[in-house]
C-alpha cells in the first residue's frame, strides 16, 4: 500500500512512528547532500539533518504542513544558516578572547610575569607549611621579628622558634628550587 504525502503527514500528526520512518528514509539523503554542500564537516551536516527530523517529530502534532518537500528543504536552508551564524559568532568570540589575552600579555613585562609566578609559588609553599611553622616563619620573615621577640610573643622556647624556622626554610627551599634563578633575576632587577 502506497501512502500519499497527505496520509503520511496525517499519520505523523497522530504519532505514527512508521509514517515518521518513511518520511525519514525518503528525505534524509537529499537533505544531507544539501547540508553537506554548505558546511565543512560531514558530521555537522549529519547533525543539521538530525535536528530537522528531531524537530519534525517533536512538533508533529502542531504542524500544518501542506507541502512536505518544500517544508523540509526550507528547514535545511534555515538550519544551515543558523549553523553558519553560530560559527561566525564563535569565531568572533574566539578572536576577541585571543586579542584580549595577547593585549594583557603584551602590556605586562617579562619581569612582572616572573615575579607574579614566583610570588604565587611562594604563597603555595607557605600554605603547605604546618600551621605553627607558618606562623613563626611569617613573624620572622614578614614582620621581621627576632627569634627572641617571637619566643616572647608566642611564649615558646627560643630553640623551638629556631627549629620551626629551619623546618620552614627547608620546606620552602624544596618547593622553590625551580625558582632560584628566577628569584635572583627578580632581586637583581629591582
Image (cartoon, helix red, strand yellow):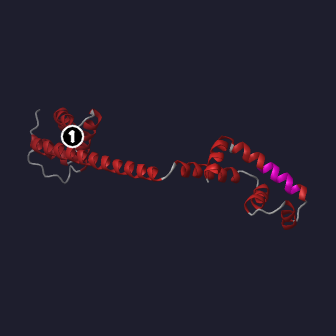
Q: Please state which of residues 142 and 93 is positioned toward the viewer in this rendering.
A: 142
Q: Which residue appears at 65% of the width and 50% of the height? A: 187
Main structural element of the magenta stretch: helix, strand or loop?
helix
Q: Please state which of residues 35 and 21 is positioned toward the viewer in this rendering.
A: 35
Classify residue 186 as left or right of residue 91.
right
- Which element type, helix, strand or loop, lies under badge 1? helix
Q: Please state which of residues 58 and 94 is positioned toward the viewer in this rendering.
A: 94
Q: Which residue appears at 85% of the width and 57% of the height? A: 161
Q: Which residue is mark 1?
A: 20
Whether 123 is among the magenta residues is: no
Please report the bounds of the magenta region as a residue range: 160-168
Q: Which residue appears at 73% of the width and 45% of the height? A: 173
Q: Position of residue 45 (x, y in %)?
A: 25, 37
Quadrant of the snapshot with the C terminus: bottom right
Q: Position of residue 181 (x, y in %)?
A: 65, 42
| Residue 176 location, quadrant | top right
Amino acid at each position: 500500500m502506497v501512502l500519499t504525502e497527505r496520509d503520511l503527514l496525517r499519520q505523523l500528526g497522530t504519532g505514527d512512528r512508521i509514517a515518521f520512518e518513511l518520511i525519514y528514509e525518503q528525505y534524509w539523503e537529499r537533505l544531507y547532500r544539501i547540508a553537506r554542500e554548505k558546511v565543512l564537516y560531514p558530521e555537522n551536516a549529519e547533525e543539521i539533518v538530525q535536528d530537522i527530523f528531531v524537530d519534525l517529530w517533536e512538533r508533529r502534532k502542531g504542524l500544518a504542513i501542506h507541502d512536505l518537500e518544500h517544508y523540509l528543504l526550507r528547514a535545511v536552508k534555515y538550519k544551515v544558516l543558523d549553523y553558519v551564524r553560530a560559527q561566525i559568532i564563535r569565531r568572533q568570540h574566539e578572536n576577541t578572547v585571543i586579542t584580549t589575552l595577547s593585549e594583557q600579555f603584551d602590556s605586562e613585562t617579562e619581569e612582572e610575569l616572573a615575579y607574579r609566578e614566583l610570588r604565587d609559588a611562594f604563597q603555595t609553599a607557605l600554605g603547605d607549611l604546618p600551621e605553627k611553622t607558618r606562623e613563626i616563619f611569617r613573624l620572622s620573615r614578614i614582620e621581621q621579628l627576632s627569634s627572641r621577640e617571637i619566643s616572647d610573643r608566642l611564649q615558646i622556647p627560643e630553640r623551638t622558634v629556631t627549629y620551626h624556622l629551619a623546618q620552614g626554610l627547608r620546606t620552602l627551599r624544596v618547593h622553590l628550587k625551580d625558582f632560584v634563578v628566577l628569584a635572583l633575576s627578580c632581586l637583581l632587577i629591582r
